[in-house]
Amino acid sequence: MSTVLLIEDETELARVAQSYLEKAGFQVILASRGDTGLSLFRQHKPDLVLLDLNLPGMDGLDVAREIRRQSDVPLIMVTARVEETDRLIGLELGADDYIVKPYSVRELVARVRAVLRRFNRSSGGSQILREGNLEVDLDTHTVKRGDEEIFLTPTEFQLLSTLMAQPGRVFTRLQLLEAIQGVAYEGYERTIDAHIKNLRAKIEEDPHHPHYVETVFGVGYRFRKG
């Protein structure tokens, strides 16, 4: 049974979300404050964190920052903030997905399942993708650049392996969103740009002049051949 840490200060919303998640087979730990949530994260080491951005005690973005300093655990932001910059900051901090209030609890459960699926996905046998000094092991979910191991979030790993498996193919943002989430939620495709930015910062020698992940202007992205 996977454990979900839900950090949410709206009591009724937290109760309903907990009920649906538990019916879906998850164990749920609740926190109503950012600082409390961070303490529970360190104590219980959950399989996934659902994190509201507007929290008493400690702001959600600060909680996300601290979590990412310690772990690559799957992280979904839950926010009522309408400013796109807030969502992009969260994604750049390493969040794997976000969902905006008010939301359908069924959609929330679907997002949790999708993120955990790509985190736990196993190909059944060791499959390694290589290009230049970059190596991606699909079985162990490890990435190396030369002798250096690079730590990616589940979303970044799935994004890289999707692009790398078909070098030269141009993927639209919607196609990449569907590849990493299992479904493309309309209006969310621009979040791919934030994930690509994070990915380049980790795998490229010079993220501002990327060698591996190329932008195809007006279309999307591709992994460079050779």
Image: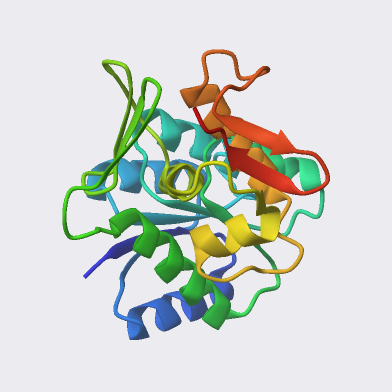
Camera-side residue of 89 and 205: 205
Instruction: Specify the quadrant of the image occupied by residue 151.
Output: top left
**Apparent side of residue 122 relative to residue 90 in the rendered image (left or right):** left
Camera-side residue of 132 and 187: 132
| Relative image position of residue 125 (x, y in whole percent) | 16, 55
Above or below 131: residue 175: below
**Apparent side of residue 29 relative to residue 173 in the rendered image (left or right):** left
Instruction: Specify the quadrant of the image occupied by residue 122.
Output: bottom left
Instruction: Specify the quadrant of the image occupied by residue 129.
Output: top left
One can see residue 123 in this view: yes
Camera-side residue of 56 and 196: 196
**Apparent side of residue 61 relative to residue 86 in the rendered image (left or right):** left
Above or below 57: residue 66: above
| Relative image position of residue 191 (x, y in whole percent) | 68, 49
Query: Given the current orientation, which residue lies at the most extreme front position?
Result: 226
| Relative image position of residue 57 (x, y in whole percent) | 55, 41
Residue at 58 percent across and 33 percent down: it is 213
One can see residue 59 in this view: no
- Counting labels gives 0
Residue at 40 percent across and 42 percent down: it is 38
Quadrant (top left/top right/bottom left/bottom right) for the N terminus: bottom left
